[in-house]
């Protein structure tokens, strides 16, 4: 398998029956998507400018950089691979971008994760891409369930 066989980008979206001002606080929180189908609270600590340590009870600590934010329309994050106890030195540093679009009856949440086509091994890229493709379905469904309570 070569680098061109692994797509660079995952794109998913979901409509949540809640207004943008209800969806934004969750989606703009670094690492909110670190879950297993249910939104749970994380300990979040500022490490340096725009970099946050997100501590999850099951998955440990992760460093996440806030790359950009236009409240309440879009926010982007980058995993800082190799900078936490859970990361492997060859882990991908993907960019995760969320956009919110108000629609009748709610908000469309769109996620684009990119950066899978370069770096590390073919097998690692493929495994990460496949896991994250499935993961975004689960994580967006968790956001929907949490925000529509």
Image (cartoon, grey):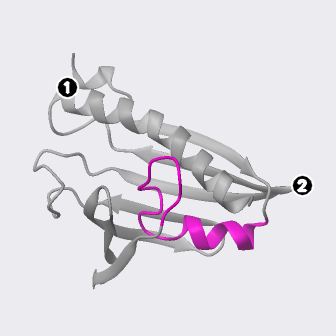
Q: Is residue 20 magenta?
A: yes
Look at the numbered disc 1 and give the secondary structure of its residue.
helix
Q: How many marks?
A: 2
Outermost residue toward the front in this view: 57
| Residue identified by numbered label 1 | 123
Q: Quadrant of residue 72?
A: bottom right
Q: Which stretch did the figure color magenta?
A: 19-40
| Main SS, magenta residues | loop
Structural crowding at the residue carrying mark 1, measured as other residues with C-alpha within 10 Å and reported as few (<14), some (14–19) or many (≥20)? few
> Which badge, 2 or 1, is on the more N-terminal residue?
2
Is the N terminus in the top left, top right, bottom left or bottom right quadrant? Answer: top left
Residue name at image x 20 percent, y 32 percent: 124
- Above or below residue 44? Residue 82 is above
- Above or below residue 2? Residue 65 is below
Percent position of residue 83, x then y: 16, 64
Percent position of residue 36, x then y: 45, 48
Q: Is residue 2 magenta?
A: no
Percent position of residue 136, x then y: 50, 42
Mark identifier at residue 104:
2
């Amino acid at each position: 398998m070569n680098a061109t066989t692994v797509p660079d980008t995952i794109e998913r979206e979901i409509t949540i029956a809640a207004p943008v001002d209800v969806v934004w606080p969750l989606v703009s929180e670094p690492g909110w998507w670190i879950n297993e189908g249910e939104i749970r609270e994380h300990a979040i600590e500022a490490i340096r400018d725009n970099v946050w340590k997100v501590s999850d009870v099951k998955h440990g600590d992760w460093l996440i950089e806030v790359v950009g934010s236009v409240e309440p329309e879009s926010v982007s994050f980058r995993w800082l691979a190799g900078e936490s106890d859970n990361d492997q030195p060859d882990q991908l540093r993907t960019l995760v971008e969320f956009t919110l679009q108000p629609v009748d009856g709610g908000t469309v949440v769109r996620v684009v994760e990119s950066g899978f086509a370069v770096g590390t091994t073919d097998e690692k890229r493929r495994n990460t891409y496949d896991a994250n493709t499935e993961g975004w379905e689960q994580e967006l469904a968790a956001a929907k369930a949490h925000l529509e309570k």
